[in-house]
Image: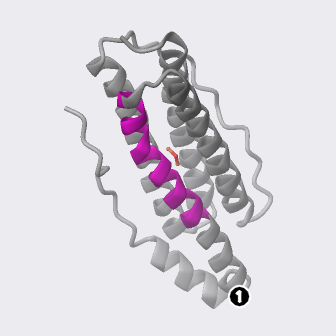
Amino acid sequence: MLDKKVVKLLNEQINKEFFSAYLYLDMSNYYYGKGLAGFGNWFKVQAQEERDHAMLFLTYLQNNGQEVVLTAIEGPDKKYDNFKTPLDGALEHEQFVTASINTIYEEALKVKDFRTLEFLNWFVKEQGEEEKNAEELIQRYDLFGSDAKGLYMLDSEMGARVYAAPSLILD
Ligand code: FEO
């Protein structure tokens, strides 16, 4: 039996991960609309990863005999002023998700829920990578994005990203 507060936070995390998928799909749509199909692809793959994250939280709750509570997913209301705005937004959002995962971790630690801590370890590591990727994108855009040729190359590179299933597998 898992602690009630931990279960509540895990359920809320499902919503946050699906919202992340929505947010990144919105960014993907923005870039496709601007003719930057590589950026569009990159964010579409990112959205697929977020859906996977949501499903991992859902499966973890199911595997532990807990009720899964699905709530309404907010629509993204991001206004993108220029090509860089979504990149800054993505980093900000990942920092928000990291804080959210850390909150669940703290709660699980408080009640000595070692099973959930073990599950969350993958996400703690993953968030480190997510923030690093978002930071690198900003850095690369700052370096190459202001010049048309550089932007073209960057877009081509981002178009090569392919979806891969998460390394964490829950039966
Ligand atoms: Fe599911 Fe990008 O954190």
Q: Position of residue 22 (x, y in %)?
A: 55, 39
SS category of the residue bearing label 1: loop
Residue 94 versus residue 143 in the image, above or below: above
Which residue lies under the disc numbered 1? 147
Which quadrant does the C terminus fall into? top left
In the drawing, does residue 163 fall left or right of residue 92? left
| Residue nearest the observer in this picture, 25 or 51 | 51
Label 1 beta carbon less than 8 Å to ligand 1: no
In the drawing, does residue 168 fall left or right of residue 156? left
Coloration of the structure image: one colour
Q: Residue at x 56, y 26 (%)?
A: 107
| Residue nearest the observer in this picture, 171 or 3 | 3
Q: Position of residue 165 (x, y in %)?
A: 29, 51
Which amino acid is tagged 1? Answer: Asp
Magenta stretch: includes residue 21: no
| Residue nearest the observer in this picture, 45 or 2 | 2
Residue at the extreme right: 81
Tell me the magenta residue range. Answer: 115-134
Q: Position of residue 156 (x, y in %)?
A: 47, 78
Residue at the extreme left: 171
In the drawing, does residue 41 fall left or right of residue 145? left
Residue 54 versus residue 64 in the image, above or below: below
Within 10 Å of the Cα at label 1, are there few (<14), some (14-19), or many (20+) other Cα atoms? few
Q: Residue at x 60, y 42 (%)?
A: 97
Magenta stretch: includes residue 118: yes
